[in-house]
Image: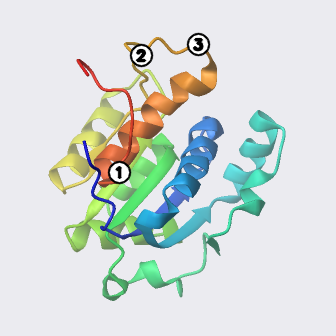
Amino acid sequence: MLLDTTKKHKIVIAIAGASGSLYAQLLLNKLLSYAHQIDTLAVVMTTNAKTIWEQELKNDHYKHYPWRYFENNDYSAPFASGSSNYQTMIIVPCSMGLLGRIAHGTSDSLMTRAADVILKERRKLILVLRDMPYNLIHIKNMELVTLAGGIVCPANPHFYNCPTSIDDLVLTVVDRILDIAGFQIKTSRWGE
């Protein structure tokens, strides 16, 4: 099967302060492989996300990716406005607190403002939730975001490709995120 790699993505990766930094790291690593499909990629991280990354992954590799980084209080970032035409925002991992603020339109940071912009412009917002179990407030917030056009993508791996490492397992989620975002990727698929 020939992959259409002519589509260029204008995308925001937001890394929130939830456990699950490995999802963000492997997503950023994989995006390096698909740089030819990217027009513009911007990254925003919370201060807590940086702390959790360093604690969980024992590195500060988030500082070394080739994309432009923005502070979470920088409302002058291009993707804080719909006129910048970013088509996709992926929040990985997305905390339940951030989900709640997005669901209720509380634009109190660059992340929540950008998510609000993506939703109001009817573009693609992908929230990669890592927390569990869910309480009714979480479920109602997921419903609100879904009704507003967002995509709730819990970080639930699949096992039909027989992963042999934690990275392999996490990459099943990363590949699903990239599929949802519209990237043309090679990945294991059910029945293929």
- Residue 53 position within the rendered picture, expressed as x and y whole percent measured from the top left: 73, 44
2 and 3 marks in contact (CB < 8 Å): no
Label 2, residues with CA under 10 Å away: few <14, some 14-19, many ≥20: few
Q: Which residue shows up at 32% across the image and 57% down it?
A: 125
**Image position of 146 (left or right of 30):** left
Mark-to-mark CA distance, 1 and 3 = 27 Å
Q: Which mark is residue 126?
A: 1
Q: Mark 2: which amino acid?
A: Asn
Q: Earlier in the sequence, mark 1 or mark 3?
A: 1
Which residue is identified by label 2? 161
**Tag 1 and tag 3, C-beta contact below 8 Å:** no
Answer whether residue 28 is visible to the viewer in this image: yes
User: What residue sits right under mark 3 in the picture?
Assistant: 164
- Amino acid on which disc 1 is placed: Ile
Disc 3 marks which amino acid? Thr
Q: Of discs 1 and 3, which sits in the foreground?
A: 3
Is residue 129 something that shows in the picture? no
Pick whichever, 167 or 81, lies toward us. 167
The residue located at (55%, 47%) in the rendering is 30
